Image (tube, helix red, strand yellow):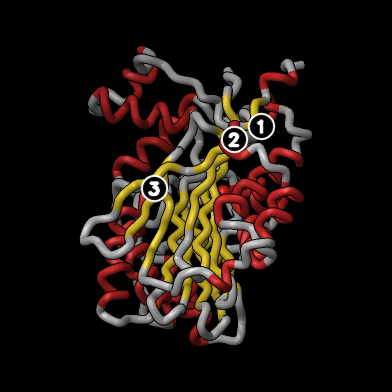
Amino acid sequence: MYPREILMVSRQHGLSTSAALAAASAVPFANAAAPRNIVISSANGLIACARAMQMLKAGHDTLDAVVAGVNLVELDPEDDSVGYGGLPNEEGVVELDACVMHGPTRRCGSVASIRGIKTPSKIAKLVMEQTHHVMLAGEGALRFAKAWGYKEEDLLTEKSRLAWLVWKQSLRDKSGHNNWTGGTGASVKKPSVALREAFPDVDEAMLGYALDRAMNPITGTINCLGLNAKGEISGVTSTSGLSWKIPGRVGDSPIIGAGLFVDQEVGGAGSTGRGEENIRIAGAHTIVENMRHGMTPKEAVLDALKRVARNYDNDPVRLAAFDIHFYALRMDGEYAGGTLWSSGKKLFAVNDGAPQSRLEPCVTLLDNRPKTN
Ligand code: GLY
């Protein structure tokens, strides 16, 4: 058993949940500053925040703004965790999850396991706008998108197809499925001779990328939250989910209350990273409710992270197998990003009016992540 004392909670936030609630409830945010234009997202959303901010300044609706921002990332073939170019399932098919929430009208929409559509967040918005449903999945979601004029396309890029082939060639689980329960953190300096021979025309850097992804399946995602100066807030989350997943696996991203939650009276929250752990704590809803009851965004995301850790009895060895990140934006414009491990993705994107977005540090819950290989 890993020594208990290794599980070090970062000093910056040693506050227990109840202490934080008690302390925070003395300072209700309702008395805080007036709302302002502000957009935050996961670190892969610098461009999304900038685009959304442009639209907020031009007076567009908050949901239109954040979805337009996220569309840029969904359409970017270089982001292998979202939309076009996202890493596929174990059969080499890209399956996408997304959801949206519109604060002013308190509506939401979602698609799960949709194939063939580059911008699933737009389809989630269509579900919200054009149906009385909240979530469409799989084949039905695709048919709905096509009925509204969307073209079914191949979402694999040369890069994502190669990563899948490398995974299939050498690394998939003996059961034939990806039953991955955590990153291996494994790294090799050079592809093996056998792998080199299997892909003779692929350059070294590209093969190295593919091998890294094959060994370390990802759950990258984009979450983006936007607030305007009128005090309206909306959010969107979009992902290609866990790479090499069993077809049909749905993560947290399309689940209202897990991958995203927005309440016009309080604020919004979202998540990226290991979706299964987020679903278990209904993370986004938990964070918004924490803020409703007086926690600051920082305290609220830390509380969510503590709930994730508690589900593993705070055991660092089992927690080391994954990472998870939360984002929160309160109605007064105060915001935070939080991440489980201080050694992981420690930044999130913010735009409060500048032409370019910036990265800011996340609060982190745990230090000294044990090695898993
Ligand atoms: N957070 C993305 C996923 O787990 O699918």
**Residue 45 falls in image quadrant:** bottom left
Q: In the figure, 164 relative to 136: above or below?
A: above
Marked residue nearer the N-terminal end (1 or 3): 3
Q: Nearer the viewer, residue 306 or 345?
A: 306
Which labelled disc corresponds to residue 201? none
Mark 3 belongs to which amino acid? Answer: Ala
Neighbours of disc 3 within 10 Å: few (<14), some (14-19), many (20+): many
Residue of label 1: 319
| Quarter holding residue 262 | bottom right
Which of the 4 image quadrants contains residue 138?
bottom right
Q: Is mark 3 within 8 Å of ligand 1?
A: no
Q: CA distance from mark 1 to mark 2?
A: 6 Å
Query: Gap in Å between the C-alphas at discs 3 and 2?
Result: 18 Å
Q: Nearer the viewer, residue 137 or 277?
A: 277
Q: Position of residue 260 (x, y in %)?
A: 56, 63
Which amino acid, mark 2? Answer: Phe
Asked if residue 345 is positioned above or below residue 187 in the image, the reply reads below
> Does the residue at mark 1 contact the one at mark 2 (Cβ under 8 Å)?
yes
The dot on residue 43 is 3
Q: Residue at x 65, y 57 (%)?
A: 24
The residue indicated by pointer 2 is 322
State the image coordinates of residue 314 (x, y, percent, origin top left): 74, 32
Q: Quadrant of the C terminus?
A: top right
Task: Give the left or right position of residue 44, taking residue 110 as reference.
Answer: left
